[in-house]
Amino acid sequence: MNIHEYQAKQLLKSYGCPVSDGRVVLKAEDAKTAAGELDGPLWVVKSQIHAGGRGKGKFKEPEAGEKGGVRLAKSVAEAAELARQMLGKTLVTHQTGPAGKQVNRIYIEDGSDISRELYLALLVDRGSSRVSVVCSTEGGMDIEEVAAHTPEKILTLTIDPAVGYMPFHGRRVAFALGLEGGQVKQMTQILGNMYRAFMDKDMEMLEINPLIVMTDGNLKLLDAKVGFDNNALYRHQDIMELRDTTEEDPKELEASKFDLNYIALDGEIGCMVNGAGLAMATMDIIKLYGAEPANFLDVGGGATKEKVTEAFKIITSDPNVKGILVNIFGGIMRCDIIAEGVIAAVKEVGLTVPLVVRLEGTNVELGKEIIKNSGLNVIAADNLADGAQKIVKAVKG
Ligand code: ADP
Ligand code: MG
């Protein structure tokens, strides 16, 4: 799960990290009051979406202006006007994809006088089972670009969680970033606090881009991107409350309500499968026969008829889906349950695309019987290859 920049900053502030004073704005009419509570003389008006590259992004609507999703204002009135322009508009950045994301929240914060922009991130490194610290003097820009063209400008070190954070980690980072004097001490404190937040809250990623050196020499976190480990969210009620479901794919959101493992993809063949391994194999074989899967979906081992119905509804709600392949190997999951779920769903939402069903395993005969007697226009398949070929043929002709 990801959170917004302003939420990440509030969280990091509570861990002692230096951030600017700011106010979040949900409605244009509140922008003036919010900006008026800040000192000035410079205000920064920042679109809050779960994607980076906002500064260099572009709005789809011309009335939102051409200047990107992060803008400077010289007065309260100007800050309020910029907030009004951007709220409700669609911002496209290199991370949002061409569809962009609607800006529903604006963060107005005090402008900082920047001397240098640095990069600092903490990540879970699965390879070493440690926490990676990644830093670079080339902050403010796309770190992937830096990695591709000037990899020598990125330093990575790891922290062993069994030992924890030590001030020497902070000093190494500080020297790599060319900091000196009191800045070194600030850096050791900032990194220590970031590490504490990272571990306490089960983060997967904590990226500060940029971490700035201000003209007065002090350090500050100017942007913050945080991702949490979903499997640990149950023990962080406070973090769960920060969830903004408008940032999530509506189909994935619906699936999560029913505890379905669903990931939306770009292809045309909707897949309903039980077991993650079989779901992967099904996607592979669809590609092998020349089509693309529209989703990954694992209905799980103990799915009920209701769960199968919901899964089917989610698949059919995707306008890209031109055909559906149901591929079930009934072990714990019984084929008759799947058959009943599919029929219930088709009766509820209708079926406008070809449907191929391949059932195997527990109660397979009963399952096939149920589908046959339903009178639905279902293409039966005998095995995985047969099912994949039939659905690809039905879709592509
Ligand atoms: P993104 O990474 O999504 O483009 P950032 O928050 O990093 O968004 O902002 C982009 C750039 O805007 C920063 O690199 C910085 O130069 C400038 N900026 C952002 N916030 C402030 C601020 N409070 N004061 C001054 N400049 C800012
Ligand atoms: Mg940034």
Image (cartoon, rainbow, N blue to C red):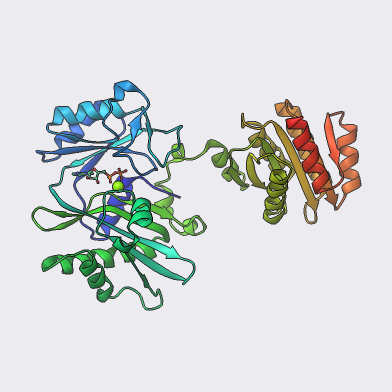
Viewer-side residue, 78 vs 282: 282
Picture quadrant of residue 34: top left
Residue occupying the far front of the picture? 149
Q: Quadrant of the C terminus?
A: top right
Q: Is residue 80 above or below residue 332?
A: above
Judge left or right: residue 114 versus residue 307: left
Judge left or right: residue 255 versus residue 30: right
Picture quadrant of residue 314: top right
Q: Is residue 270 above or below residue 140?
A: above
- Quadrant hosting ligand 1: top left
Q: Is residue 21 above or below residue 251?
A: below
Residue occupying the far bottom of the picture? 163
Viewer-side residue, 155 vs 276: 155
Q: Position of residue 82 (x, y in %)?
A: 23, 28
Q: Is residue 33 visible?
A: yes
Q: Is residue 188 visible?
A: no
Residue at 34% x, 32% y: name it. Answer: 58
Q: Position of residue 64 (x, y in %)?
A: 30, 25
* Number of numbered tags placed on the structure image: 0
Q: Position of residue 390 (x, y in %)?
A: 80, 38
Residue at 74% x, 40% y: name it. Answer: 325
Residue at 29% x, 48% y: name it. Answer: 141
Q: Position of residue 139 (x, y in %)?
A: 26, 53
